Structure formats: structure tokens, C-alpha cells
Image (cartoon, rainbow, N blue to C red):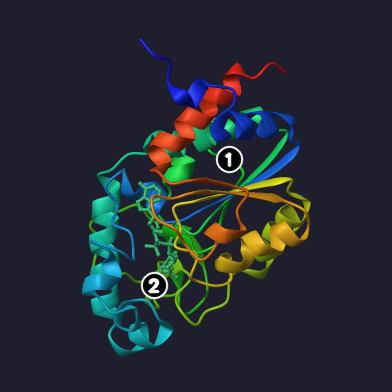
């Protein structure tokens, strides 16, 4: 039987595996595509959430002010969907990678919590978490895993309305988290970018910042993105297939 081309040391995958094994600092940026194989819909592209919903009706502070029940219904529906799914081999490979690289930072735009569930520890959830609520009155943030949520949910401490603790369009990212991400990007020798269309700022610029500071870039996505021309390695495939193959290849590299 012919050996899989993935394990041939002259393939780009083996070349990347070798470089990752030698690297001290690696960053990964993930987007909705990494959770697609778990059954979580992406935002753009076929079947994407923004195909049937307008972000300005559901994911802006103005939308919440105008119709908080509608926004909560949508988030409650997504929470119900995410509660039923599990991390896929792509999430698990990234969790594994954390053990093979001395300093590994995972920056995710995903709010679904699947990276942590897969075992990743050094995770920056720059768009927040769908499993956290934040009080619009006293600002208290709390984990809340109830599915379904009572609609509408109110703060136990002060009685004001709660909102999802996620970043909406037009809102700033948490400055401390952004600072930590910047630092990791500045020091990264290799940056993996998986499952993101690369069109939502500031995450869309992260790879270019890292490249300016000397990182080599890797893209894992079935489709090309605006970032593709800047990448040193491009794997046009699913993260749930490419990432486990990459981890398997890394484990065959002598250290
Ligand atoms: P998008 O929905 O914009 O892009 C998903 C990307 O995943 C696309 O480039 C797909 O080609 C790719 N993809 C699909 N299946 C894949 C698979 N199995 N493996 C790898 N890649 C796959 O999602 P994001 O880039 O995450 O923000 O979107 C960024 C932000 O826009 C989100 O965090 C969200 C959204 O509006 C907010 O809600 C603030």
C-alpha cells in the first residue's frame, strides 16, 4: 500500500511539522470554520448565520437596546445548539499542540468554548464567551450554562437586565486581552490561521502584525481568504483533517 503523502518528509506538511518542532513561540488564530465540523454554523459562506440574519439586528449594542428579547432569543438558540456539540479533531489537535511547543497562545474569535472543552488552556477568547452573561447595570460577569435561559435573564445582584458577554459589532475588544494577544503576535515565530475568513477587525490584521515582527504564516482553510497571498504555508482543507495530520507529522520529527 502506498504511504500517505502527508508523511513524506518532503511535503509542505512535514516541512511545517519540522519548523513547528524547532519553534519556541507559536500563535494560532481560529475562527468559526474550526467549529464547523462540530456542527456549529459559520457566519459567512454557504449555510452561514449572516446569510439568513442581519448582524445589525442581532449583534450590535443598538439591536440589543431596540429589542433585547429578539437578541436573547437568538443567543439562546445558539447556546442550545452549541450545548449539544463536542470538540472535533481540529480542536483536539490544537490542544495537543500546546504540549509540543514551549510557548503556545491560542487566540480565538469563537465564543462557543469548544477550545477549552478540548483541553486548550492558554486561550484568549477575544470575542468573549457565549457561556457568560454580563449585567447591563452593575457590570458583573458570571458564567451561566443554563439551556434554555429564562428570557429575559436578570442580574441576581442588582436586578438589571443581563446581556451575553460577547463583543458585538461596533464594540471594543477587552484591552487587557488585546494587549496579551499583541505581545504573543509580536514574539511568534510561526502563526497558524485556521477557519477564519479574515474580514473582521482587528483579528483580520493579527497575521500581518505577526508577519511584520518576523513570524511565518500558515493558513488552514478550504477556501482562499484575503490572507492567503501572505502565507508561507497554505493548506486548502478542513481544520479537522489538516491539524490532526500536522500533529501526527510533528510527533514523527526527531527532537
Ligand atoms: P466566517 O464565517 O467569516 O468564516 C469562516 C471561515 O471558515 C471561512 O473562511 C470558511 O472557508 C472556513 N471554513 C469552513 N469550514 C471549515 C473547516 N472545516 N475547516 C477550516 N475552515 C473552514 O467566521 P469568522 O472568520 O470566525 O464576530 O468570523 C469572524 C467574526 O465575524 C466572528 O467572530 C463573528 C462574526 O460576525 C462577531 O460576532 C463579533
Distance (Cα) linking label 1 and label 2: 27 Å
Q: Which one is earlier in the sequence, the residue at label 1 or at label 2?
A: 1
Give the residue at x 57% y 77%. 172
Residue 13 x/y as whole percent: 55, 33
Which of the 4 quarters of the picture holds residue 104? top right
- Which secondary structure, mark 2? strand
- Where does the N terminus fall, quadrant-wise? top left
Q: How many marks?
A: 2
* Left or right of 253 in this view: 76: left
* Left or right of 190 in this view: 158: left
Q: Is residue 159 visible?
A: yes
Is 3 above or below relative to 49? above
Please name whichever residue, 233 or 104, is drawn nearer the observer in this view of the structure: 233
**In which of the image's four quarters is ligand 1 placed?**
bottom left
Q: Is residue 152 visible?
A: no
Is 108 above or below relative to 175? above
* Left or right of 25 in this view: 129: left
Circle number at residue 121: 1
Q: Nearer the viewer, mark 1 or mark 2?
A: 1
Residue 187 x/y as whole percent: 78, 51
Please name whichever residue, 120 or 4, is drawn nearer the observer in this view of the structure: 4
Is 88 above or below relative to 155? above
Q: Which residue is mark 2?
A: 162
Give the residue at x 52% y 37%. 94
Crowding near pointer 1: few (<14 within 10 Å), some, many (20+)? some
Crowding near pointer 2: few (<14 within 10 Å), some, many (20+)? many
Residue 109 x/y as whole percent: 49, 59
Which of the 4 quarters of the picture holds residue 72? bottom left
- Which secondary structure, mark 1? loop
Amino acid at each position: 500500500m502506498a504511504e500517505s503523502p502527508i508523511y513524506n518528509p518532503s511535503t509542505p506538511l512535514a516541512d511545517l511539522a519540522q519548523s513547528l518542532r524547532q519553534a519556541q513561540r507559536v500563535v494560532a488564530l481560529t475562527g468559526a470554520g474550526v467549529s464547523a465540523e462540530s456542527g456549529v454554523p459559520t457566519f459567512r459562506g454557504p449555510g452561514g448565520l449572516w446569510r439568513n440574519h442581519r448582524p445589525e439586528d442581532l449583534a450590535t449594542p443598538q439591536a440589543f437596546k431596540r429589542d433585547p428579547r429578539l437578541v436573547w432569543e437568538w443567543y439562546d438558540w445558539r447556546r442550545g445548539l452549541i450545548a449539544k456539540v463536542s470538540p472535533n479533531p481540529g480542536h483536539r489537535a490544537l490542544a495537543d499542540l500546546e504540549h509540543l511547543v514551549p510557548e503556545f497562545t491560542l487566540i480565538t474569535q469563537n465564543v462557543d468554548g469548544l477550545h477549552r472543552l478540548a483541553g486548550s488552556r492558554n486561550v484568549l477568547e477575544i470575542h468573549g464567551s457565549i457561556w457568560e452573561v454580563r449585567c447591563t447595570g452593575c457590570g458583573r460577569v458570571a458564567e451561566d450554562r443554563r439551556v434554555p435561559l429564562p428570557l429575559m435573564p436578570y442580574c441576581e445582584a442588582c436586578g438589571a437586565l443581563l446581556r451575553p458577554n460577547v463583543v458585538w459589532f461596533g464594540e471594543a475588544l477587552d484591552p487587557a486581552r488585546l494587549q496579551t494577544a499583541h505581545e504573543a503576535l509580536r514574539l511568534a515565530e510561526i502563526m497558524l490561521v485556521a477557519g477564519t475568513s479574515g474580514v473582521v477587525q482587528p483579528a483580520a490584521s493579527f497575521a500581518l502584525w505577526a508577519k511584520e515582527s518576523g513570524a511565518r504564516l500558515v493558513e488552514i482553510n478550504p477556501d482562499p481568504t484575503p490572507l492567503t497571498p501572505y502565507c508561507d504555508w497554505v493548506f486548502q482543507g478542513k481544520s479537522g483533517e489538516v491539524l490532526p495530520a500536522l500533529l501526527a507529522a510533528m510527533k514523527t520529527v526527531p527532537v
